[in-house]
Structures are given as structure tokens and as C-alpha cells.
Amino acid sequence: MKKVSMGTKAIWAGESDYLAFGATQVPVVHSVSFGYDDMDEWYEVAIGNKEGHIYGRNTNPTSQAFEDKVKILEGAEHATSFSTGMAAISNTLSTYLFPGDRIVSIKDTYGGTNKIFTEFLPKMNIDVCLCDTGDHEAIEAEVAKGCKILYLETPTNPTVKITDIARMAKAGKEAGAIVIVDNTFATPINQNPLELGADLVLHSATKFLGGHADALGGVLVGPKELVEPVYHYREINGATIDPMAAYLLLRGMKTLKLRIKQQNENAMKIAEYLKTVDWVDDVFYPGLEEHQHHDIAKEQMKGFGGMLSFSVKGGVDTVRHLLPKLQFANRAANLGSVETIVGPSRTTSHVECTPEERKAMGIPEGLIRYSAGIEDIEDLIGDLEQAFQSLPKELYTSV
Ligand SMILES: *Cc1c(COP(=O)(O)O)cnc(C)c1O
């Protein structure tokens, strides 16, 4: 499917091998096991000499169709799926990191990932080095000291910072590290880390890939040689995706390009609108020229994504008044859905931190994360306008 463009791939890729009975849609195969009358064939499949399925914890046709679609969209050789995005991350790290190893990453990774780095890996005697996000020199210096894995995420939560993937991949290669990128925020429509030199790419498919906030899942793609050991870890340890979830994610992905195009456009217009609102102190969106990493984003991304954040005058009190006033937004911890989703960073991505820690990380208490949906932009802006107009004036001058 090399010459086919992304929107067409999103619809057709990975499906034809799994159709049966003339169905035009991939079936949801709920069977836990797969039977064989021929003992020799069963044996050949079981030892991996012949294609086929044995047991649902290992492989499933619906889940494989989902894996194939992501694999083709990311331009990868191989893929494997997981019950959640966190399972993709933890299984990948557990496959490759052993006591005494070192991993280099950034401070702004997803909250759950950060917990793995700060709570679980140190217990296993794994040395975790977290650099300031966007400080490329610091990351290069730490990587050059030697590490097994360089783990990146870009754009990041909640201030949408950008890391130069090509530059970091080069540093990682020189140090002999496996370079992993969490591509959840960008999706393969906006960013292709494998083309930029990353070794492995993973996703929380729960977010933009599925796009409808109705199924959890994770996926890892890359060269077969690097993905297969993680598949093996997962098939034994059991963080397997449910076939129904795999189906929902597969179906969601058919509209991936349309959704991302609309979310890119909506996020840009929302960011520009927010800049004109006097209640708003700061707007963080990589599509804005004044964003600290706009130039890198322009270079490595095909679109700036659907995620942005902004801080408001009056801090938490203003947030408390503003968000419930929005008619076309879910107030929830999720992101990347067709509906617009809003939430305070202190409640969503950085709920585990103290106010002092958030301050040190450059996250104002009044910071709002905004995941642009695919609604019509005039309704989203109108919604924000009426919400800002409803704010009590005395909050404006409070801290
Ligand atoms: C949500 C998210 C995850 C974790 O995914 P789950 O499916 O919730 O386990 C990992 N990385 C990023 C960037 C996320 O937004």
C-alpha cells in the first residue's frame, strides 16, 4: 500500500485479510480459542511455522486487523496491540529494561508514564534520567553518557512542548539506544516518527486513533526484530486487547484523516481566538508562531494537532466558573475524541503533583487543557464566548 495516501489507507488498510462470508467489514471474533482437526497443522501453527491462531491471549483476527491498520499508517514492518496505552508502554519498557540499565526521557511525559519512571523503574534498580522537556542539549548530553532506551513523547501534556525527533534519534543511535516515541498526541496523520529515525512508536489508541472515547487500547509498531519480543512479553503477561475494543478502534480509524484534519483546523482557530480574550493569560499551541518550539513543529509535523492549553486570570476560581458553562465540551480526563473535551491540568494530567510541583513544572493552577473535537468551529468559539461573558468580574483581578 506504499503509494496510496493516508486517508485511503485509513479506510482500506489491514482489512482484506480478515473478511469472511463475503462480509465487507472485519468480523468481531469473540472465540477464546481456535480449533484444529489436523494435529500436524495445529502443531505447525503452535510453534509458529504456519499462520493461524491458537488462543485469544496470544492472537485474534480482529485484533490483528487493528494492528495491521496502525502498522500500515505508521509505515512500520510490524505491530502488536495491548489492552491500554499504558500496557503498551509498560510492556515495552519491561521487555527491554533490566536491573542496572539506564533510561533517558523528559519531565513532561504523560502522567502514567511519569509514574513508571519515578515510582516503578527505580524499585527495579533501573536508573531513570528525566531532562527538561525541549532542552535538546541536555538530552543529548545525558544520552551520550550511555542508555538502553531514549524515550520521547511529542507534543506533550499539558503545555504542548515539542522535541526534535530527528535530532534526538541521531543522538540515540550514536549511543546505541533504542529510541521510542509516544505518538499519541500527533497520530500518524500529523507525524511519522519512524521516518524521522525513531526505532519504535507507540500509541494510546484510546485517544485519537479510536477517536470516539468508547474503547481502550494500545499499540506498538516498528521493525519485527524489536516488536516481536514485546509481543512475546505481552502474550505471556496477558495485557491483551479485547476483540470488541480492537473492532471499535479499527472502525474509528477509518475516519482518522478526516477527524484529524478538522481537529487541526479547530485547534488552530481556538488558539487564535483565545489570544484575543482578555481573561486569557497564555495560550500554548505549537501552531502559533510565538510557541517556543513552533519551528521544530513546522519541520517535523504535517499538522499541529488537536491539543492546546491556556491559562486564565483568576486561576482555579475562574476555571471552576468557566468550564461548567460550556455546552459543547465534556469535562473529562480523556482527549482525542470527536467531542471537545476540557479539563484543568491540576485535575487531569498532573493530578498526582502538589501545587508546588506543578509550579516548578511551569503549569499554572488555572491551566485548562483543551482537546478540540470535530464540531463546527463557530459553535465552539460561540460556546467559549458565552462562557467567558458569564464570568463574575471580581475574579478578573483576583490571583
Ligand atoms: C492517555 C495516554 C496514555 C495512556 O493511555 P491509556 O490508553 O489511557 O492507558 C499514554 N500516553 C499519552 C500521551 C496519553 O495521552
Image: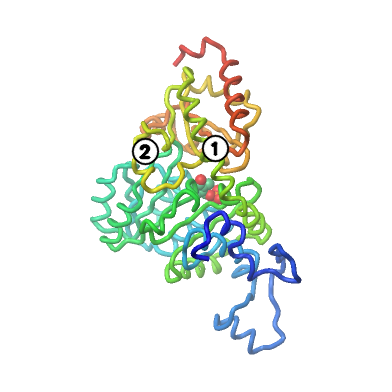
Image quarter hosting the C terminus: top left
Report helix, strand or loop for mark 2: helix
- For the residues marked 1 and 2, what is the alpha-carbon distance in whole angstroms? 19 Å
Percent x, y of residue 287: 43, 37
Number of callouts in the render?
2
- Colouring mode (rainbow / by chain / secondary structure / one colour): rainbow
Q: Amino acid at mark 2?
A: His
Percent x, y of residue 17: 63, 71
Q: Quadrant of the rendered structure where residue 44 is?
A: bottom right
Q: Residue at the far right: name it.
A: 21
Disc 2 packing (10 Å; few <14; some 14–19; many ≥20): some
Residue in view at x 55 percent, y 33 percent: 343
The nearer-to-camera label among 1 and 2 is 2
Q: Is residue 393 above or below residue 369?
A: above
Report helix, strand or loop for mark 1: strand
Q: Pointer 2: what residue?
A: 294
The foreground one among 71 and 316 is 71
Tell me if 291 is positioned left or right of 321 in this view: left
Residue in view at x 44 percent, y 54 percent: 192
Mark positioned earlier in the residue sequence (1 or 2) = 2
Q: Amino acid at mark 1?
A: Ser
Q: Is residue 209 above or below residue 231?
A: above
| Mark number, residue 371 | 1
Q: Residue at the far front: name it.
A: 3
